[in-house]
């Protein structure tokens, strides 16, 4: 749940997506792939504009969670796109940088199921 003074629209407009090699199995914007054995593979057909838009939509809608503590940005944000739910995790809370990945349906937040 966002802190009472959180301006979600402002946070959403400033949030940005940063590619993560840990969820890639081929060379691309994230550089050399480093897919972790416990990480879900991201679809290869997504654009930066798409994922940044989904991230910003999720934050603006309040589909956020995790520990905020003294951080200006939420730790997590979720966006359902068709039959997939993507989770974005803050990589740099001061700058509002996130990386994202698809979730297994068993991991979906209940309100997005």
Image (spheres, helix red, strand yellow):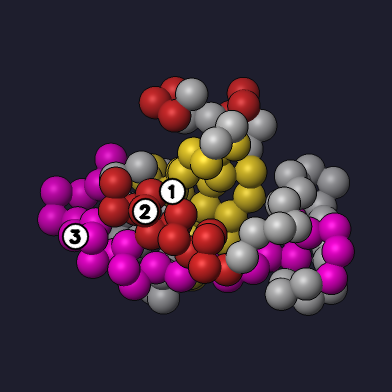
Upstream in sequence: badge 1 or badge 3? 3
Residue range in magenta is 1-27
Real-space Cα separation, disc 1 to disc 3, in angstroms: 15 Å
Q: Nearer the viewer, residue 18 or 38?
A: 18
Q: Residue at x 31, y 68 (%)?
A: 13
Q: Is residue 75 above or below residue 103?
A: below
Q: Tell me, yes or no, whether the two marked residues, 1 and 3, touch with CB atoms within 8 Å.
A: no
View extreme (left): residue: 5
Q: Residue at x 58, y 55 (%)?
A: 100
Q: Which residue is mark 2?
A: 57
Camera-side mark, 1 or 2: 2
Indicate the position of residue 26 as horizontal and vertical percent values. 86, 64
Indicate the position of residue 52 as horizontal and vertical percent values. 48, 64
Mark 1 neighbour density, 10 Å: few (under 14) some (14–19) many (20 or more):
many
Q: Which residue is mark 1?
A: 77
Side of 97 relative to 72 (left or right) = right
Mark 3 neighbour density, 10 Å: few (under 14) some (14–19) many (20 or more):
some
**SS category of the residue bearing label 2:** helix
Indicate the position of residue 40 as horizontal and vertical percent values. 74, 44
């Amino acid at each position: 749940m966002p802190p009472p003074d959180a301006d979600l629209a402002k946070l959403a407009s400033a949030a940005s997506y940063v590619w993560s090699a840990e969820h890639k199995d081929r060379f691309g914007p994230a550089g050399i792939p480093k897919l972790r054995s416990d990480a879900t593979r991201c679809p290869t057909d997504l654009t930066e504009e798409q994922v940044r838009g989904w991230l910003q939509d999720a934050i603006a809608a309040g589909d956020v969670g995790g520990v905020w503590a003294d951080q200006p940005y939420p730790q997590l944000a979720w966006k359902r796109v068709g039959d997939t739910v993507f989770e974005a995790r803050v990589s740099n809370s001061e700058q509002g940088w996130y990386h994202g990945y698809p979730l297994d349906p068993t991991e979906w937040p209940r309100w997005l199921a």
